[in-house]
Image (cartoon, rainbow, N blue to C red):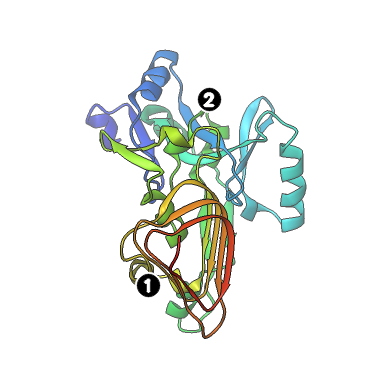
């Protein structure tokens, strides 16, 4: 009601960690011209997108199902069904556009009844902070509200509008040369066309904290324009001007260290053991 009193008509909602979630005036213009009440942005599901709600049409309206709303067996069955539907390759980015007047009306009528989701698996650092106590986290998915609006729609957007940074794996990608900053927004480089938008990156426990991550990448993230998949495990350090292409797996055994020397070019390589690459 306060926003309505200020003359506001629409609100844009997104996850705080999504660096691609900027206000797109083209989407807003479409919502205004078609008098929509609710809009959800969806994008193509890639290999690394394990989570993310599935969309189905139910009684003529889109309905969002979240993984934590059902047993794992049922979720896997639902995902298999989704692959055969028009929504199969899509998932919810949680970029949402809502007509404030419609939202206020439904709230006053108590018609937005979102499912409560239980988060059972906490990250290691969260377990440490709990001091051994059992923590149960309950959530509701804002995107689930789409089924309560009469005039809603879904818009398919490019991957650049979904760039969450929840881990150092994600940070590695957004800090790389995959993206350029244009007018305050991250834009995927044209050279990446024809490949998956963002490569799969799996950094090990040695890269888990930001401090450790920066220590092991003192000269910044390698050139990854041609990278498809990267797995790093163990005590690994990267030098300057390193280039990674294709599938690269680097595993330093326990008690050993691997230094990827400055200027190294690794293409479809597996590096293991205790060594330092000095030739390229």
> Residue at (44%, 35%) from the top-left corner?
191
Query: For the residue carrying disc 2, how many other residues have a C-alpha within 10 Å: few (<14), some (14-19), or many (20+)?
Result: some
Q: How many marks can you see?
A: 2
Of the two numbered discs 2 and 1 on the same chain, state the one appearing first in sequence: 2
The label shown at residue 153 is 2
Residue 42 placement, left or right of 179: right
**Residue annotated with mark 1:** 212
Contact flag, marks 2 and 1 (Cβ < 8 Å): no
> Residue at (71%, 38%) from the top-left corner?
82
Q: Estimate the x, y position of residue 64 in percent, counting from the top left.
A: 60, 40
Q: Residue furthest left?
A: 6
Choose top left, top right, bottom left or bottom right for residue 237. Answer: bottom left
Q: Is residue 116 visible?
A: yes
Choose top left, top right, bottom left or bottom right for residue 4. Answer: top left
Q: Estimate the x, y position of residue 119 in percent, counting from the top left.
A: 56, 62
Q: Residue furthest front?
A: 279
Q: In the picture, which quadrant includes the C terminus?
A: bottom left
> Residue at (41%, 31%) from the top-left corner?
98
| Residues at marks 2 and 1, CA–CA distance in whole angstroms | 43 Å
Question: Which is closer to the viewer, label 2 or label 1?
Answer: 1
> Residue at (58%, 55%) from the top-left corner?
117
């Amino acid at each position: 009601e306060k926003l309505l009193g200020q003359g506001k008509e629409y609100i844009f909602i997104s996850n705080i960690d999504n660096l691609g979630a900027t206000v797109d005036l083209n989407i807003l213009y479409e919502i205004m011209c078609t008098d929509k009440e609710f809009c959800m942005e969806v994008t193509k599901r890639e290999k690394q997108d394990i989570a993310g709600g599935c969309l189905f049409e139910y009684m003529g309206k889109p309905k969002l199902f979240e993984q934590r709303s059902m047993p794992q067996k049922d979720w896997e069955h639902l995902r298999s069904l989704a692959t055969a539907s028009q929504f199969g390759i899509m998932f919810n980015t949680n970029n949402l556009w809502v007509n404030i007047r419609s939202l206020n009306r439904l709230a006053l009528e108590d018609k937005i009844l979102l499912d409560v989701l239980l988060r059972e698996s906490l990250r290691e650092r969260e377990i440490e902070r709990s001091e051994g106590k059992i923590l149960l986290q309950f959530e509701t998915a804002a995107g689930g509200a789409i089924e309560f609006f009469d005039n809603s729609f879904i818009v398919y957007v490019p991957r650049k509008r979904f760039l969450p940074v929840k881990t150092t794996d994600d940070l590695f990608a957004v800090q790389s040369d995959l993206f350029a900053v244009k007018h305050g927004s991250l834009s995927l480089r044209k050279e990446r066309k024809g490949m998956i938008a963002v490569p799969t990156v799996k950094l090990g426990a040695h890269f888990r904290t930001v401090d450790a991550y920066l220590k092991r990448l003192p000269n910044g993230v390698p050139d990854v324009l041609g990278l498809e998949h990267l797995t790093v495990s163990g005590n690994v350090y990267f030098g300057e001007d390193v280039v990674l292409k294709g599938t690269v797996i680097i595993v330093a055994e326990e008690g050993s260290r691997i230094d990827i020397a400055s200027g190294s070019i690794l293409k479809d390589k597996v590096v293991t053991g205790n060594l330092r690459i000095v030739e390229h």
